[in-house]
């Protein structure tokens, strides 16, 4: 499946340490010819961290995509009724976002976009980045691995000795996983 001509949402949450990879993959998605609509969680658009300023990240997303990011629940809600996206990627998908999503909570622009997008039975791709994947969030990962139209970028432990419960997506597999999700398939192996 080609990404050229596809409209892909990239929903950005607050795993700030992954942003360098996020923006590199945004560049690649745009280079593939996809129309990319970013959606920022409340945290992603408002919290400055040692990795950079939130406002700069929002501006960088718009520079790469040429499209203003969605930043409110009201802006994200039409993703469903207007069928705005072919694919939605939550990248990075924090443990907080993962837990809320698995439990039907829709209190951020990212979660609203995900809920709205799934009503169209189109693929949702999760690129996890969580320090508790092998802890409290394992049950949520299990629920979502078994859910219709939800796919994962393959993931694995990122620092087993210092952070034994932490897992992160293999972002170099984002585009192949996106192509598979558009075909209704899970890129394999999921855990690497």
Image (cartoon, helix red, strand yellow):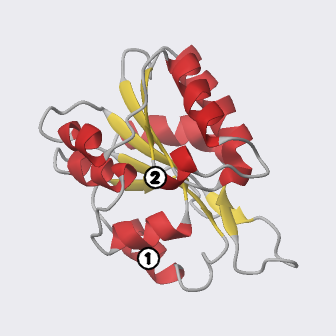
Foreground residue among 27 and 14: 14
* Residue 70 in the image: above or below residue 110: above
Q: Distance between the residues labelled 2 and 1?
A: 21 Å
Find residue 77 and report its horizontal and vertical position in percent. Answer: 21, 44
Q: Quadrant of residue 24?
A: top right
Residue to which mark 1 is pinned: 140
Reply above or below: 101 against 177: below
Residue drawn 58% across and 15% down? 31
Q: Give the residue displayed 43% in from the left and 73% down from the top.
A: 99
Residue 185 seen in the figure: no
Determine which residue is flagged by label 2.
42
Whichever of labels 2 and 1 marks the residue nearer the N terminus, that label is: 2
User: Which image quadrant is residue 103 in?
Assistant: bottom left
Comparing 145 with 126, the one in front is: 126
Query: Left or right: where does residue 152 sit relative to residue 82?
Result: right
Picture coordinates of residue 167, whole percent (x, y) = 67, 67
- Closer to the camera, 40 or 133? 40
Q: In this view, does 183 lie above or below 30?
A: below
Q: Secondary structure under badge 1? A: helix
**Disc 2 to disc 1: CB gap under 8 Å:** no
Q: What element carries label 2?
A: helix
The spot of residue 137 in percent (x, y) is: 52, 79
Write down the quadrant of residue 56 in the picture.
Answer: top right
């Amino acid at each position: 499946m080609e990404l050229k001509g596809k409209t892909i949402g990239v929903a950005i949450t607050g795993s700030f340490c992954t942003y360098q990879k996020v923006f590199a993959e945004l560049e690649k998605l745009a280079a593939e010819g996809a129309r990319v609509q970013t959606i920022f969680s409340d945290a992603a658009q408002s919290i400055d961290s040692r990795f950079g300023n939130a406002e700069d990240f929002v501006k960088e997303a718009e520079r790469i995509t040429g499209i203003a990011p969605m930043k409110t629940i009201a802006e994200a809600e039409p993703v469903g009724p207007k069928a705005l996206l072919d694919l939605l990627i939550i990248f990075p998908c924090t443990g907080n976002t993962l837990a809320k999503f698995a439990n039907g909570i829709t209190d951020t622009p990212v979660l609203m976009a995900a809920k709205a997008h799934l009503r169209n039975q189109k693929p949702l791709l999760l690129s996890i980045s969580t320090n508790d994947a092998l802890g409290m969030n394992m049950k949520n990962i299990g629920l979502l691995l078994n859910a219709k139209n939800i796919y994962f970028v393959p993931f694995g432990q990122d620092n087993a000795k210092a952070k034994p419960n932490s897992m992160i997506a293999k972002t170099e597999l984002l585009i192949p996983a996106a192509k598979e999700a558009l075909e209704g398939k899970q890129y394999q192996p999921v855990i690497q």
